[in-house]
Amino acid sequence: MPELMKEGLIILPTTGNQGQDHSAILKDLQEMLNQTFGGSTLISGIGSWTDDNGKLHQEDVVNFIVAGKDTAINNAMLRGIGVSFGRHADQMSVYVREFSGTVEIIPIEPAEQIQAA
């Protein structure tokens, strides 16, 4: 019996923190996921979270769903793609669900901090 695939997920907002349109970044992410995993499904939604001061934040998001085998390489590729595109979209963190089912909100260092190191 062939090994079954599982779902992986990356969630990114449709706009930046200053309201800038992310449609080109989201299109590039879909193309990268299609090239890497053979396809993707996009589902629009609303993400929300409460900050340290108790304020509720909401934003339009896109859920990028891909299918793949639960391997260390596939999980590392999914995480790497999520962080790369999260950084490109100027996010402080990115939500990634690996093929294993593990969910992580990955903090993203700004590019200028990485270059200075």
Image (tube, rainbow, N blue to C red):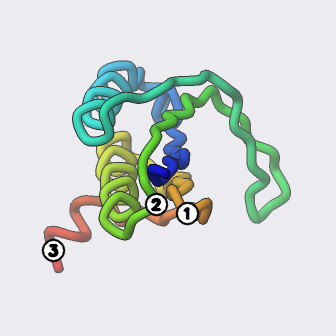
Which amino acid type is marked by label 1?
Ser
Disc 2 + disc 1, Cβ < 8 Å:
yes
Any mark on residue 70, and which? 2
SS for dot 2: loop
In front of the other: 17 or 24: 24
Any mark on residue 116, and which? 3
In the depicted structure, whether residue 17 falls above or below residue 100: above
Disc 3 + disc 1, Cβ < 8 Å:
no
Q: Quadrant of residue 109?
A: bottom left
In the depicted structure, whether residue 36 falls above or below residue 87: above
Q: Quadrant of residue 117?
A: bottom left
- The mark nearer the N terminus, 3 or 2, is 2
Residue at (30% x, 33% y) in the render: 38
Which amino acid type is marked by label 2?
Asp
**Spatial CA span between label 2 and label 1:** 5 Å
Which amino acid type is marked by label 3?
Ala
Residue indicated by mark 1 = 100
Residue at (52% x, 54% y) in the render: 96
In the depicted structure, whether residue 11 falls above or below residue 115: above
SS for dot 1: loop
**Spatial CA span between label 3 and label 1:** 34 Å
Local crowd size for mark 2, using a 10 Å CA cut-off: few (<14), some (14–19), many (≥20): some
**Residue 101 vs residue 57: left or right?**
left
Residue at (72% x, 35% y) in the render: 58
